[in-house]
Image: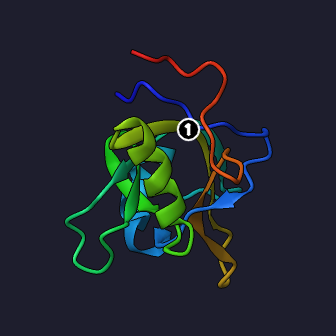
């Protein structure tokens, strides 16, 4: 795992994008779709994906070893620059998986992922430097 942790403010206000493509993996991680949905805090790994055919600055978001989305393309270069400034390709942060309900009658919600990170992106004070 990563030796760096991104700073957060406890608000989980940073929205991941592309989760709609990873609903089955999010359901596995969160324990499936329920009537009430989930609010599951967990750890996420953010990893550079320079070979991404759409964006060389892509930063994928993984939870439990499964890709669940990406950092928005507009913020990815800023995050890449932070990673490159210390020579790393991945970093940890806190995440929350929300949603995933089905109450019948069309009242359903997809899973979404929000991260506990602040902008400008920075490392947490308790980052383990090695």
Residue sitting nearer the eye, 111 or 54: 54
- Image location of residue 34, percent across then percent down: 60, 56
- Image location of residue 117, percent across then percent down: 66, 46
Q: Is residue 25 above or below residue 54?
A: above
Identity of the residue drawn at 55% across and 38% down: 93
Left or right: 95 in relation to 89:
right
Residue marked by disc 1: 93
Left or right: 8 in relation to 84:
right
Residue 27 in view: yes
Residue sitting nearer the eye, 89 or 19: 89
- Image location of residue 36, percent across then percent down: 71, 56
Identity of the residue drawn at 40% across and 50% down: 28
Quadrant in which the C terminus is drawn: top left
Residue sitting nearer the eye, 4 or 84: 84
- Residue 1: name its quadrant: top left
* Other residues around mark 1 within 10 Å, as few (<14) / some (14–19) / many (≥20): many
Dot 1 lies on which element?
A: strand
- Image location of residue 3, percent across then percent down: 42, 24
């Amino acid at each position: 795992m990563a030796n760096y942790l991104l700073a957060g403010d406890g608000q989980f206000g940073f929205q991941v994008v592309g989760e709609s493509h990873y609903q089955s993996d999010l359901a596995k991680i969160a324990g499936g779709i329920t009537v009430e949905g989930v609010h599951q805090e967990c750890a996420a790994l953010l990893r550079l994906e320079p070979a991404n055919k759409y964006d060389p600055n892509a930063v994928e978001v993984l939870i439990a070893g499964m890709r669940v989305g990406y950092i928005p393309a507009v913020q990815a270069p800023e995050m890449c620059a932070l990673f490159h400034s210390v020579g790393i390709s991945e970093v940890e942060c806190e995440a929350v998986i929300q949603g995933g309900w089905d109450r019948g009658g069309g009242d359903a919600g997809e899973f979404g992922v929000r991260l506990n990170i602040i902008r400008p992106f920075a490392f947490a004070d308790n980052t383990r430097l090695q």
